[in-house]
Image (tube, rainbow, N blue to C red):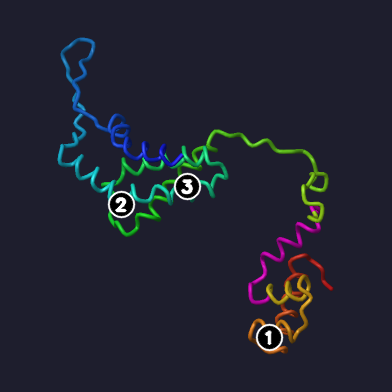
Amino acid sequence: MHGDRECIVSGISEVAQDDDVITAAQVANTDATTVVLDLRPVPTAAGCKQQRDRFNILVAPRRDELFRYACWLTGDRDIADDLVQETLVRAWRSITALENPKAIKSWLLAIMHHENARRFAHIQVKLSSLPVEDIACPRAHYDTSTDAYVLRQALRALPRDVCVPLLMQVLGGYSLKGIALRLGITAAGVGTRLFRARKKLRTFIGDPD
């Protein structure tokens, strides 16, 4: 796999140039009296060398890093390899437009995310008519009921400073003093945060009590 990526990087200029280098062409119309010129600029030899040098310095050394990220993003090594190839080709085509070389990492990852999104552009999602409660879950302890879903959404909406103490108490079984010790606040402060957390949860869920 690593050898394949080496070939991709070494051959990227040939692939990209076949796609991107545009020469001025004369196209005659049917009566042969008018000629239309494609006046888009033709890359010079110096320009191509600058493009190749910039690509080799900024992009090529990051191919392994891109592959690791693509594996995480896709969960499939083969798809990741294809995604890296597409990212490198796109990077080659636009490398001369990169204004800040220090932003190369975020620039490449943005390209990769765009290319990954293109994989799903033509996929039509089929909606299921099954209620949430009837959807099988591989984790037996994971509650898929509507009430559980609402509760999880409510917890996600809580500010972190009040959510953490609540989870420590409910899931971790910590006492007020134990929570205070671990968070570096007073027990009274923990009590206040727990009160605010429960109040916000009741408001979110719609329970007046």
Magenta segment includes 74? no
Choose between 183 and 28: the one closer to the eye. Answer: 183
Magenta segment includes 146? yes
Disc assigned to residue 26: none
In the rendered structure, the answer to whether residue 179 lies left or right of residue 68 reads: right
Q: Mark 1: which amino acid?
A: Leu
Q: CA distance from mark 2 to mark 3?
A: 19 Å
Q: Which residues are magenta?
A: 144-162
- The residue pinned by badge 3 equals 113
Given this view, does label 1 or label 3 mark the residue nearer the observer?
1
Choose between 47 and 32: the one closer to the eye. Answer: 47
| Whole-percent x, y for residue 119 in the image | 52, 37
- The residue pinned by badge 2 equals 58
Q: The C terminus is located in which quarter?
A: bottom right
| Whole-percent x, y for residue 121 in the image | 53, 37
Q: Mark 2: which amino acid?
A: Leu
Disc assigned to residue 181: 1
Q: Are marks 2 and 1 in contact (CB under 8 Å)?
A: no
